[in-house]
Each structure stands twice: as C-alpha cells, then as structure tokens.
Amino acid sequence: MAEARIGVIGGTGLYQIEGLAGVQEIKLNTPFGEPSDAITVGKLDCVEIAFLPRHGKGHRIIPTEVPYRANIFALKTLGVERIIAVSAVGSLKEQIKPADIVIPDQIIDRTRGRSNTFFGDGIVGHIAFAEPFCPVLSKILFDSAGETGASVHSGGTGIIMEGPQFSTRAESELYRSWGADIIYMTGLPEAKLAREAEICYATIAIVTDYDCWNDKAESVTTEMILLNLARNVSIARQTIKLTTNRLPVQRDCACASALHNAIATAPELIPAHVKEKLKPIIGKYIR
C-alpha cells in the first residue's frame, strides 16, 4: 500500500489536487468506519501527498456527518505526519475581507454531539491542546500563502459551529464580542483527533463572506461561498505546493509526541481488543 508523509484534507471547493503524478486511489476501512471517500496518493514535485475530500466527491456529507475519526485514522495508517486542512470560513472582523486567507492559531468549540476522541472503551487519554494548530506547519503555510500574492493573516481565533445552517445575527454578534476572527463548521473534531494521532495539523482558511453580522455586506449564501471559493482555490493549491517543498524532514514540535505521558490507563488494564484497534495511534506507547 502506498504511503505519504503529508496529508491534505480538502474542504468545500477543493475536491482534488492537480498535478499529482503516479496517482493511486486507496479505499480503506477503519475501526471507525470508512473515510469520507477514497484517498488519492501521488507525488507533487516528488513529494508524496495523500489527498482526502472531507465532504466526499460531489460534496455529499454535511459537516456533522463527516467521519472525522475514520479520516484521521486512515491518514495515520498511510504514514501521514502532517495534515494541511483547507476550509471555507466566514469573517467576523471588518479587516478580514472575503478572498483573504487566514492561518488560524486558536479555536473555540461550538459543536455538539460529534465523536471527538479515539479514547474510551477502556482507555483514557488526555492530550494537551492549548495550541491546537502546529506552529511550525502554520508558519510555513503563512509564508507560502504570502508568496502567492494573497492577502494573508497570521493567527486568529476560529469559532467551530455545528451547522449546516449559518449563524443567526445574534450568534454572529456574540462570537464577535468574544474576539473571534473567523467562523466555520469543520475544524473540530478534526484538529483534536490529529493531535491524538500525533499528526501536525494546520489550516488554510479561505474567507468567503462576512457571516451575517455586517449589515453593509450581502448576506451569506451558498452561491456566494462557492463563487468566492472558486477564486481562491488556485491560491490554496499554490500554497500547498510551496509548503510541501519546504517542510523539514524531522519534526521537533510538540505534536510529534502529544501522547507521551497522556495515556492515564495502566497498560495491563487496557482491553486487548482496544490495544489492537488503536495500534496505529498508541502502538509506540502501549504494547
């Protein structure tokens, strides 16, 4: 089976990576079900990439129903160590304009009922999540995006809402009062699961609208989002291409050892079937 050190999770508008050579489509099943779609593995400028469309080809899966655990687990089994996630987002700040790019560094969880951990069923783990995005990967993404000519913002707090409906005006104003910068529906539990899997994770957030707080701007619609995305998907692709050629081989960030001392359950008390199920995640710590 093909392997790749870099994974790309494409959001709305990004359903494939152009220019991949030696393409192989891999269909996987995991202990958490099937991923959103087949994973495409190929070389981008001699760098192995694993691409997964978060919503499935043809955009068939709503944010709540994305099989996040299966997606991250499948990428982990392919050898992925870094994930570049692409998401369409709304802006909560006047200075963050539609067509801008944000590389966020913080998130606030407003989702409900999504399975957000690999742990449970007889094993307890508590990862540190104060810095939810890999700072090393985020810095390279920011520098690369800047070279495309895009207006790029370094850092920012994202609200992750449940969806699939957009915000009410009262909700939008509440999130602005919290100092949040952008809002979207898919950053969690994706980022939490990537950290549990010791995978570096960072996001290219493509701003498509002003949510609904800005009464001077057109109200957010699906048509608006898709139109603005079409303009910026090429920037996301260029950013990914530049980034993959600049990533260091060795990882010295905290993401790479996130599970060190995080598993609280005594090894002898972890059920054998759980050890086997989670072997790709916990295997280097629990045997």
Image: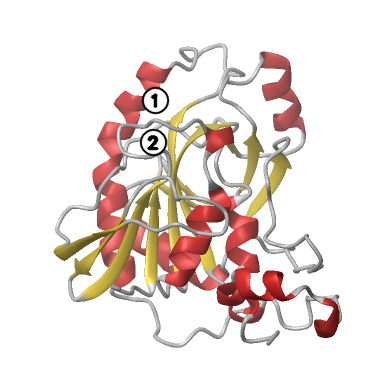
Identity of the amino acid at label 2? Thr
Q: Which mark is residue 12?
A: 2
Q: Residue at x 39, y 58 (%)?
A: 28
The vertical placement of 184 against 266, above or below, is above
Along the line of sight, which residue is nearer the eye, 189 or 96?
189
Along the line of sight, which residue is nearer the eye, 246 or 127?
127
Q: Residue at x 70, y 37 (%)?
A: 111
Q: Is residue 154 left or right of residue 11?
A: right
The vertical placement of 215 against 186, above or below, is above
Looking at the rendered image, the quarter that the N terminus falls into is bottom left
The vertical placement of 166 against 57, above or below, is above
- Decide if residue 104 is in sight here: no
- Decide if residue 125 is in sight here: yes
- Looking at marks 1 and 2 on the same chain, the residue that comes earlier in the sequence is marked by 2
Q: Please, what secondary structure does the residue beneath circle 2 have?
A: loop
Q: Quadrant of residue 280?
A: bottom right
Q: Please, what secondary structure does the residue beneath circle 1 have?
A: helix
Q: Which mark is residue 48?
A: none
**Mark 1 near mark 2, Cβ–Cβ under 8 Å?**
yes
Is the image coloured rainbow, by chain, by secondary structure, or in one colour?
secondary structure
Where residue 131 sits: x, y (%)?
Answer: 68, 64
Where residue 126 sits: x, y (%)?
Answer: 80, 67
Q: Name the residue carrying label 1.
A: 225
Spatial CA span between label 1 and label 2: 9 Å
Label 1 or label 2, whichever lies nearer to me, is 2
Where residue 200 sits: x, y (%)?
Answer: 53, 69
Looking at the rendered image, the quarter that the C terminus falls into is bottom right
Identity of the amino acid at label 1? Ile
Where residue 234 sits: x, y (%)?
Answer: 24, 45
Q: Is residue 44 left or right of residue 267?
A: left
Packing grade of label 2 (10 A; few <14, some 14-19, many >=20) is: many
